[in-house]
Image (tube, helix red, strand yellow):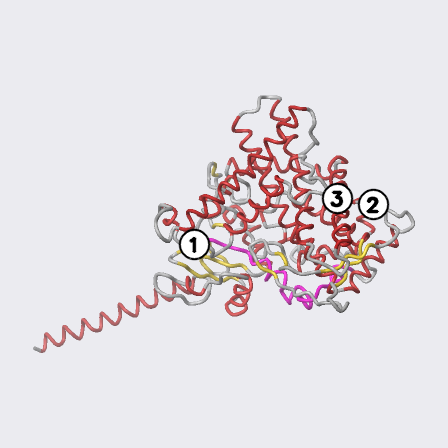
């Protein structure tokens, strides 16, 4: 009996030791991972993930756990970066392993947006040998590189300085002002200008991308309708947490007729709408080129360059993809930023007055609208544009990145296959970088003399507003120039005021943003034409 009892004691001792060792291993493994909210077995944090305004939830978690946090959902790891430093360190300095995209079962695979640049994967079709200069192997994808090169050739920094493109921008600007003038005259007490802004944003992108000019009096243009439906589908399919298939990728093989597979039926509709965006505007441009009635555009230029050596079906597919990528990246964000301008100016009249004083000092003696050549003389307008990007960024969370291989950052292990986001909203509302971050203040970018000061890279809102690292928006130069021209021109032409109620009293608009591509919810404002400016009256 003694030996039996002694053996049992040894067994118990061994069990305790093994349990303790296992606990140490598990704790050590967990401690190596980025911190984050505790989840449940198997499902992880699936039940406490936000369904809307997710950037605000992630911002609260960052304040509790730090600027690099991790959570899981059914075994899928997600990391959120909430500081400019972390984003710079990983997406830029280690961009060769942080620039891939996750599979994106809904938006990328089922709806088909992985054909374009935004969701294009960077899986290793070539793999460089590590060296002291590049300690990580460089991964690239031939399609991704081709699409980016096509962007660079057509809307890169050099292309954006051409007189032809400037003329298209001013042509679209004049159309925008006329639309706003008519809308303001139709509702003198103020109204919701969302539809007019969308028509203008869509019209500009159709003009630059396809050479398609929307008639000024059109409110139901067929191509604008195609674009609008496709963009709504893009935003819907890209919404983090909107579809279980993004957390359980095997669900993409579930037949559409099975109960609960509504996402499959929705994907069929969204895919068809995306395909119409790819094909119909392209075919319109191609037909106009054949008839000799085209307006020069991105698509016509790409087709012409390929026709010299023969336009193949594969060339056409790439041109359709890059054109749709430019449109999807530009129309909705332009729409959101211009709506933010109207909202901010109705809320901050003193800022609007200062901006218009700067414009008047430069332009009033000539009675003209501003041009891009005036930009060096309009620093406050430049600061106002930067503040619009910071105040409520168009894409508050950005598109997902995927970690290509195991990596250690600040002692935290980030595993291969982890989905990783930059919380752009959180970065642009960091109190350590921006004093009073919830106040709209263009002066934060100016020096004592009123000129744009030299900003640290991590302080400039454009650092994250246009995407990051190798995934930076290739159309950023076009967007930057066009938005400056639009903002300066709208403020030259109109005084933006709060809408009036039935008693003639001003009504305070509600500041409320939501959506994957974030834009203000419905609000009303009043446009009062300013006297003495050409092109408005």
Q: Badges 2 and 3: C-beta atoms under 8 Å apart?
A: no
Q: Which mark is residue 415?
A: 1
**The furthest residue to the front:** 502
Residue that badge 3 annotates = 175
Quadrant for residue 204, please give it.
top right
Depth check: give the residue in front, 532 or 103: 532
Quadrant for residue 76, please give it.
bottom left
Along the horizontal axis of the image, is 532 left or right of 233?
right
Q: Earlier in the sequence, mark 3 or mark 1?
A: 3
The location of residue 190, given as percent across then percent down, is 74, 59
Quadrant for residue 511, please give it.
bottom right
Local packing at callout 2 (Cα closer than 10 Å; few below 14, some 14-19, many 20+) is some
Alpha carbon distance from label 2 to label 1 = 57 Å
Q: Which mark is residue 535?
A: 2
Along the horizontal axis of the image, is 252 left or right of 358?
left
Local packing at callout 3 (Cα closer than 10 Å; few below 14, some 14-19, many 20+) is many
Queried whether the magenta region covers residue 440, the answer comes back as: yes
Alpha carbon distance from label 3 to label 1 = 50 Å
The location of residue 150, given as percent across then percent down, is 61, 35
Q: Which mark is residue 59?
A: none
For the point 62% across and 27% down, which residue is it? 287
Depth check: give the residue in front, 116 or 274: 274
Magenta-colored span: 419-446
């Amino acid at each position: 009996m003694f030996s039996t009892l002694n053996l049992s004691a040894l067994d118990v001792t061994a069990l305790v030791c093994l349990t303790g060792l296992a606990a140490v291993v598990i704790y050590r493994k967990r401690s190596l991972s980025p911190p984050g909210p505790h989840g449940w077995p198997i499902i992880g944090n699936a039940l406490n993930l936000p369904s809307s305004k997710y950037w605000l939830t992630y911002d609260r978690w960052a304040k509790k756990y730090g600027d690099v946090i991790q959570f899981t959902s059914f075994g899928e790891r997600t990391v959120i970066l909430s500081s400019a430093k972390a984003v710079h360190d990983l997406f830029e300095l280690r961009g060769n392993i942080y620039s891939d995209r996750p599979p994106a079962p809904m938006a990328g695979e089922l709806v088909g947006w992985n054909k374009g640049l935004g969701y294009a994967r960077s899986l290793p079709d070539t793999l460089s040998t590590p060296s002291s200069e590049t300690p990580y192997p460089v991964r690239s994808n031939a399609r991704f590189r081709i699409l980016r090169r096509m962007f660079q050739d057509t809307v890169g920094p050099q292309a954006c300085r051409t007189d032809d493109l400037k003329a298209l921008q001013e042509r679209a600007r004049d159309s925008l002002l006329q639309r706003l003038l008519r809308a303001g005259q139709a509702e003198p007490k103020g109204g919701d200008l969302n539809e007019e802004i969308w028509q203008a944003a869509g019209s500009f992108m159709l003009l630059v991308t396809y050479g398609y000019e929307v008639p000024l009096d059109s409110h139901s243009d067929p191509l604008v309708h195609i674009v609008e439906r496709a963009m709504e589908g893009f935003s819907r399919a890209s919404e983090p947490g909107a579809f279980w298939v993004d957390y359980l990728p095997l669900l993409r093989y579930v037949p559409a007729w099975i109960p609960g597979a509504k996402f499959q039926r929705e994907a069929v509709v969204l895919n068809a709408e995306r395909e119409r965006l790819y094909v119909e505007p392209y075919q319109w441009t191609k037909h106009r080129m054949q008839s000799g009635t085209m307006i020069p555009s991105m698509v016509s230029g790409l087709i012409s360059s390929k026709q010299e050596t023969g336009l193949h079906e594969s060339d056409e597919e790439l041109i359709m993809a890059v054109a749709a990528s430019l449109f999807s990246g530009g129309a909705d964000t332009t729409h959101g930023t211009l709506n933010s301008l109207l909202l901010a100016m109705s809320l901050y009249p003193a800022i609007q007055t200062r901006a218009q004083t700067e414009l008047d000092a430069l332009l009033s003696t000539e009675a003209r609208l501003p041009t891009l050549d005036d930009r060096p003389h309009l620093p406050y307008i430049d600061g106002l544009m930067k503040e619009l990007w910071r105040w409520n960024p168009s894409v508050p969370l950005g598109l997902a990145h995927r970690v290509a291989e195991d990596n250690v950052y600040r002692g935290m292990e980030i595993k291969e296959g982890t989905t990783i986001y930059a919380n752009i909203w959180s970065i642009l509302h960091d109190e350590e970088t921006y004093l009073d971050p919830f106040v709209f203040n263009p002066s934060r970018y100016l020096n004592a003399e009123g000129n744009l000061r030299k900003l640290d890279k991590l302080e400039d809102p454009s650092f994250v507003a246009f995407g990051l690292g190798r995934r930076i928006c290739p159309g950023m130069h076009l967007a930057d120039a066009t938005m400056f021209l639009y903002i300066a021109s709208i403020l030259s032409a109109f005084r933006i005021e709060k809408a009036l109620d039935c008693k003639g009293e001003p009504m305070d608009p509600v500041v409320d943003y939501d959506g994957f591509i974030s834009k203000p919810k419905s609000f009303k404002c009043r446009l009062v034409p300013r006297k003495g400016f050409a092109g408005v009256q």
